[in-house]
Image: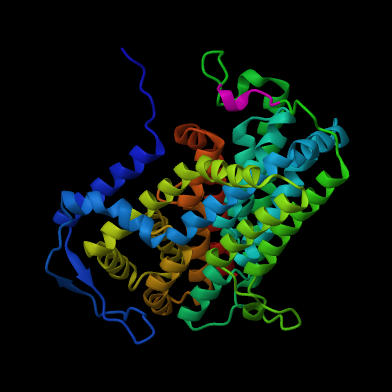
Amino acid sequence: MKRFKMPTAYTILLAIIIVMAVLTFVLPAGQYQYTDEGQPIAGTYEEIPSNGQGPGAVVLAPLQGLYEAIEIAVFILTVGGFLGVMGKTGAIDAGIAAIIVRLKGREKLLIPILMCAFALGGTTFGMAEETIAFYPLLLPIMLSAGYDAITAVAVILLGAGVGVLGSTVNPFATGIASGFAGISLGQGMVLRLIILVVCLVVAILFVMSYGERVRAHPELSLLRRRGHPPEQFVTQQTGGDTAMTPRRKVALILFALTFAVMIYGVIPFSDVGITILPTFGWWFLELSALFWVASVVIGLIYRLPELDIVDGFVNGAGELLGVSFIIGISRGITVVMNNGGLTDTILHWGEQSLTGMGSVPFILVSYVIYLVLSFLIPSTSGLATLSMPVMAPLADFSGVGRDLIITAFQSASGLVNLVTPTSAVVMGALAIGRVPYNQWLKFVWKLLAVFLLLSLLLMVAQQLL
């Protein structure tokens, strides 16, 4: 019997689009009435004529999804081009060689340091899509240190993901949810901070444990296949000229400065009450411009020929073209749901099932419902916008603080968005690291179970105290 082979991310996502399209013929379509601010009004749901999404809609959905996510796709391509130009300078190879030499025998320090840094980004400004730029940088470093690609992906994906799961001032999750719930951003801050710290410590220990096992016994890597390691597992050698010349040092400084500017540009200081620092309010259009300008500047300062700059940028962008397609297909799932009237129907079922429950059952059921909704709607800001105007008033009837509903929303959403194939961040990260989706699930499922239990226990304890 031929051994089953897990399909690619493209096939998985297209299959989900087909399933959602079929459900538009099976499930009732519906809609809420909305306020002028775009908030759905509780109790106003009504069924509407079915709008089944046929084969034509399925074919168009990934393309429409790509149109809707074009800014993210362009951002990824410009990051690839930027890295391609950096590759022409040889500065990254030289930097990797220097890091490996300096951390000889201490490579495991990379894991806690980097995971804390990414978690800080996740909890403060919802760092998610922005992490895509870091995978091509970190992968060769971790591989050269003896880890496998799963470890490298986990450092970034789990680091930033735990930060989002334990969002404290993240304006795209906690901020939007608090606004729609009618409470201040500071309410529930202590509980969210506790969840962040506890889950981050658990995640760091989990990744370090797996990583050290793989370094000591490479055959234990989940990426092994009957004794034949996949290409991305083989330790990469920097090879060639890795001398750290003055021009390479300058290129690396500009490289780091580009990422620093990126991080600063997306932090909404004004939204969290910091007025001493200017808020740029950059998003993907501005970030794309940052990376292509930085590509040209680095190429010119390094004195690369014009042809090398262009070739480096185009070839680098080409390497991430598949990731851009994945993002478009992922967005296509939401397109089918919205066009078929399923989104509001699913929200209505949640409204019906939660009304009149006791406080603890309400928290538990709300969390489960948010797990389901987060799979279908991976955008935290979109889910907060759609659900919080309904869920927050429902909490009042059950004697649950609205801040707990926000915590349930963001912790459930953060958990699901670490594995859901409807998340462009997850599928993009796995595509860059060439980590099969089934192997990622096998690696992370126990950790997710711990996150789920910890989040629920802490929320129930908060309600009972």
Color scheme of the displayed model: rainbow
The quarter holding residue 92 reads top right
Magenta stretch bounds: 230-236
Q: Left or right: 296 with respect to 184?
A: right
As for residue 47 lying within the magenta part, the answer is: no
- Along the line of sight, which residue is nearer the eye, 185 or 291? 291
Observer able to see residue 32: yes
Q: Tell how many labels.
A: 0
Q: Is residue 142 above or below residue 387?
A: above
Q: Quadrant of the N terminus?
A: top left
**Residue shown at the point (59%, 28%) measured from the top left:** 232
| Left or right: where 168 falls relative to 446 | right
Task: Give the quadrant of the C terminus.
Answer: bottom right
Residue pictured at 64% horizontal, 50% vertical: 159
Q: Position of residue 412 (x, y in %)?
A: 48, 58
**Residue 139 placed where, x, y %?**
65, 37
